[in-house]
Structure formats: structure tokens, C-alpha cells
Amino acid sequence: MRGDDDTPLQAATTADLCDELQELLHVFCSDVQQKFCIDQEVAHPQQLQRLQKTMQQIQRFIPLVGLNGSANADSLRHTLQATTLEILVLYETQCRQRHIVLMTDDDVEKLIATWHALSEAYEDKRAEHASLARFIGTIERQQQHERVPEHVVVTSMLQQQQEVRKEGMYVATVNKENYNRLGLGRRQLGTRQIVFETRQMSREDQEKAVRDLCDQFAALFMRHAHQQHLDPLAALLQDATTDLLAKRLKDELYDRVFLPTKTTAILSPNNLILASNTMTTVPAPTFAPAPWQWLDLIKTRTPYEPHLFGFMARRRSQQRPQDLPAFATLSVKRLCEHIASVGQQYYLDVINHAWLSYRRLSRALDRIESELVDIFACLQLEISRLAMQKILIILESLEQHHQHQHHKYHLMHNLTTTTSITTSTHSIANTTSATTTSTTHTKTSLT
């Protein structure tokens, strides 16, 4: 009874093993696996084609012949074992050349899950990297089309007009009534000029006043730059850094997939980009003109009387020099152009540094992507190697099961034969006893 109870379970187990075997053979024979083997240089295409053809023939014959119980089945099993061993050697050679650690099924399953988690982190980092590129591009486009408007400087000046006018400095719009008195030509009509009264302000005082104005503008400029561009840019650069992802790649995958020699060779600091990706700080711009620029900006003017409808000038030479109301002027437009040039150069430096950091991040991400692809291929090689080992284990299990069944059959056969002989012996003994009794009775009767 016990043997009868075990038979269905053993038969079901055998069927499950055969189903798993067929599935493993199907995976190896698939076009996807064959392409993978060619890409990873597991074997030459001709050799892989031969192995695939052999495995496909074995797949077709297993349901017909089986793997145990007959000479044909034994031959088929031995062919499958030999072919599997040949493929296993090819996989093991690749794993050894790539310094892959030998793993169990559980190890591979955990590492595959880790790989997917790091791949998602990589995709997130790519998205942050793209956001950084878009923001740098936005800054670049804005700087190509933006100019510092005159009213920024003029408004700042007018706010201080009451204080600075006592020092002989004020802002004036040139018109027909004052252009000649300020020593300007008709071309300057409608322009705005910063006027210095030279009797009250020396050249040094004029330059200092302009420097103070530039410093005031610099504070406004940097505050705006930080709010609109620099702080968001720094945040995006920080988000896009790859240091943490690279460290996770090393700790969670490399050190578990590869032998120490492989890890040391590939993940040395000189090879994997782990350097800081923060943007090099760009010094704040200096808007004050350089010494050689003052002559082109602040110009001394001499008043005159217009002649011939203003096309000719006649100087007031009959007046005494000390009575001449001499002026110096600084065109607001020229000052704005100077400020715009400095500001644009500053942003150009910021943009160049940002693109430099972006390119560093790009190289780091490209390297991480390459390593993720390589690690996945190595894990697939290890999965393939384990599959071949599984085939050999299944074949051994099936053979052991067959031997067990064969041994059990012989035991039952011997038991049946022994029982039959014992029964026959008892029957003969009973027959002999009956014959003896009958003879005795006959003799008694005759007597």
C-alpha cells in the first residue's frame, strides 16, 4: 500500500521535471537567446547553429522516445547530456573571462531586482540631466536677446538725484533749449545724459560717482541673477550629480557580480567619474569701467551758441574762462551698453561653466549606462549557465527516479516469485499429508 501511495507523487514529479526540461531547452533554442550568445561571443555562429539544431531535435524526440527505459531513450539522454556539457563549458568560459562571481538562483534573482532599481534611478537621473540642459538653454536664449534697458540705470539715478545734485551731478534729457548750453550737438537731441558740473566735481569725483552707480547696479544685478538663474541652476546641478548613483552601482552591483580583481580594475577613481559635478563659482562681475574706458565714456563739453540754424557753432570766447559753465557728460545709452556688455560676459561665463558641468555629467551618465548594460549581460550569462546546470540536474534526477522504479520493480517481482514458491510448497505438503491419511484408513479397513 505504501508503494502504491508513492507512485502518483513520483509520476507527477517526473512530469514536472520533464516540463521544466522542455522549457529550458525552448529558451536555449529561441532566436533571442541565440542572438544574445552571438552578441556576447559565447561561441561562433556556426557552432551555435549546430548546438541549436541538436537541441531542437532532442526536443522533438523526448515525447516520443523518453529519456529512460530503452536503448533509444538512453542514447537520447546521453546526447542531451553531452550537448548540455558543451554549452555549459562555453558559458563558464565567458563567465570566467569576465570575472563573474559564481551565483545561485536566489543570488541572481536578488541582483536582477537591484539592477532594475538602479536602472530606474538612472532614468530619473537622465530626466534631471535633461531638465538641466533645458534650463541652461533657456538662460542662453535669454541672454542672446536681452539688453539692459536704459530706464534701469536712469531710475536708479533719479532716486538719488536730490542727493547727488548738490555734488554737481544730475540727469538731463537733451532738447533744443539745452543741447548747446551742455556743449552737445543736434545728434544728441532726445538722448539722456548724466551731466557733471566741472566746477563742482573734479575728474576723480566724476569717476567715483559713476563707480558708485555701477556698484549699486551690480548689487541689483546679482540679486536678480541669483533669484532668476543662479540659484535654480545650482539646484538643478545638485539634483543631476551622479556621485551617489555611481557609489550605489559599485556597492550594490559591481562588488556582488564581479570578483575583486574586476572591481578594482574598472571602478578605480581614475576610471569611473566620481568627481564633484558642482559648477565652478564664477566671480561676480565688476561693472565699473576700466581705466582705459573713461575717456570714451565721460567727455568734457564746452557750451556754444548755435549759428546758421544750428549747423555751425560759435564759442563764447568773449567771456572770461572762469565764467564759462563747462560740463562733462556721460551718455546713459553708452553706460547701458557698457553695463550690458559686462553683464552678458558674466552670463556667458556662467553658461560656459554650466555646459562644462553638464558635459561632465553626460560622460558620467554614459559610463553608468554602459556599466549597467554590461552588468545585465553578465547576469544573463550567469542565468544561462545556471540553466545548463539545471538541465544536467534534471537528467540526473530522472535517471535516479528510473533506477528507483526499476529497483522497486525487481523487488516486487522477487517478492511475488517467493510468495508463489511458498504457496506451491504448502500445497504439495498438504497433498502428501492427505495421501498418507488415506492410505492409513485403507489399511485399517482391510484389517
Image (spheres, grey):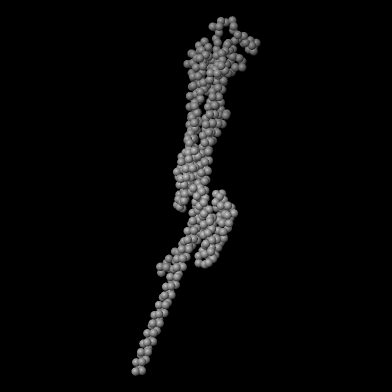
Q: Does any portion of residue 39 appear in the rendered image?
A: yes
Q: Is residue 131 above or below residue 70?
A: above
User: Which residue is at the front of the view, 143 or 47?
Assistant: 47
Give the residue displayed 46% in from the left and 45% down from the top. Answer: 260
Quadrant the N terminus occupies: bottom left
Q: Residue furthest right?
A: 308
Q: Residue furthest bottom?
A: 447
User: Which residue is at the front of the view, 374 or 19?
Assistant: 374
Q: Is residue 333 above or below residue 40?
A: above
Q: Does any portion of residue 192 appear in the rendered image?
A: no
Quadrant the C terminus occupies: bottom left
Provide residue 334's location: percent of width, then percent of height. 57, 20
- Image label count: 0
User: Which residue is at the front of the view, 369 or 143?
Assistant: 369
Give the residue displayed 45% in from the left and 50% down from the top. Answer: 107
Q: In terms of image quadrants, where is residue 2? A: bottom left
Give the residue displayed 39% in from the left and 84% down from the top. Answer: 431
Provide residue 240's location: percent of width, then percent of height. 49, 37
Q: Is residue 142 above or below residue 125?
A: above
Provide residue 186's location: percent of width, then percent of height. 61, 15
Provide residue 437's location: percent of width, then percent of height. 36, 87
Q: In terms of image quadrants, where is residue 255? A: top left
User: Which residue is at the front of the view, 272 or 347?
Assistant: 272
